[in-house]
Structures are given as C-alpha cells and as structure tokens.
C-alpha cells in the first residue's frame, strides 16, 4: 500500500474507532516513511514501475 493509501487507512481506523493498538500500528507504518532533517519532517517513498502507472492523487 502506498503512503497515500496508508494515510487513508489510518483515517478510516480513526473514524470507526478501531482499538488504539491497531491505530498505533498504522501510525508507525506512516512514520517509517518519514525523515527529519533541519527540523523538517519529509515523507517519501519509492514505488515500482507498475505502481507508478496508477494515478493516485
């Protein structure tokens, strides 16, 4: 699942009031894409060629 998809998954977990451990796991998956430099948090991911052909904005 892309970072975009993981963010929406977390939003859905919050809306349905999923148990906190499940929400925490989703947050950790998102945070694992983050990189802090110079006081700024930047999220990035590398998608394979086939996945990049899908428009997900």
Image: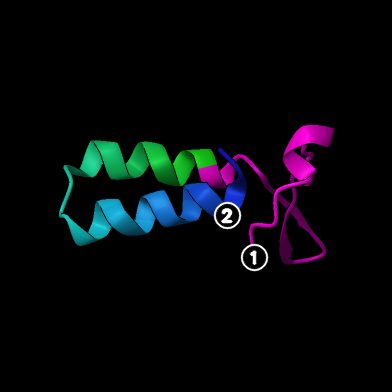
Q: Is residue 28 left or right of residue 3?
A: left
The image shows residue 22 at horizontal and vertical percentages of 27, 37
The image shows residue 18 at horizontal and vertical percentages of 18, 46
Q: Which residue does the numbered mark 2 point to in the structure image?
A: 4
Magenta stretch? 30-57
Measuring 25% from the left and 57% from the top, which residue is drawn there? 14
Crowd around label 1: few <14 · some 14–19 · many ≥20 (10 Å): few
Asked if disc 2 and disc 1 are in contact, CB closer than 8 Å, the reply is yes
Q: Is residue 9 left or right of residue 31?
A: left
Q: Is residue 48 visible?
A: no
Above or below residue 46? Residue 17 is below
Q: According to the image, what is the colour scheme of the structure? A: rainbow
Give 43 or 11, whichever is nearer the viewer: 11
Q: Which residue does the numbered mark 1 point to in the structure image?
A: 57
Circle 1: element type: loop
Measuring 64% from the left and 57% from the top, which residue is drawn there? 56
Quadrant placement of the C terminus? bottom right
Measuring 54% from the left and 46% from the top, which residue is drawn there? 30
- Mark pair 2, 1: CA separation: 8 Å
Above or below residue 8? Residue 46 is above
| Mark 2 or mark 1: whose residue is earlier in sequence | 2
The image shows residue 6 at horizontal and vertical percentages of 49, 47
The circle on residue 32 is: none
């Amino acid at each position: 699942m892309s970072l975009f998809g993981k963010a929406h998954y977390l939003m859905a977990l919050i809306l349905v009031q999923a148990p906190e451990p499940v929400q925490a796991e989703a947050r950790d998956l998102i945070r694992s894409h983050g990189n802090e430099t110079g006081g700024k948090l930047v999220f990035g991911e590398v998608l394979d060629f086939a996945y990049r052909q899908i428009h997900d904005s």
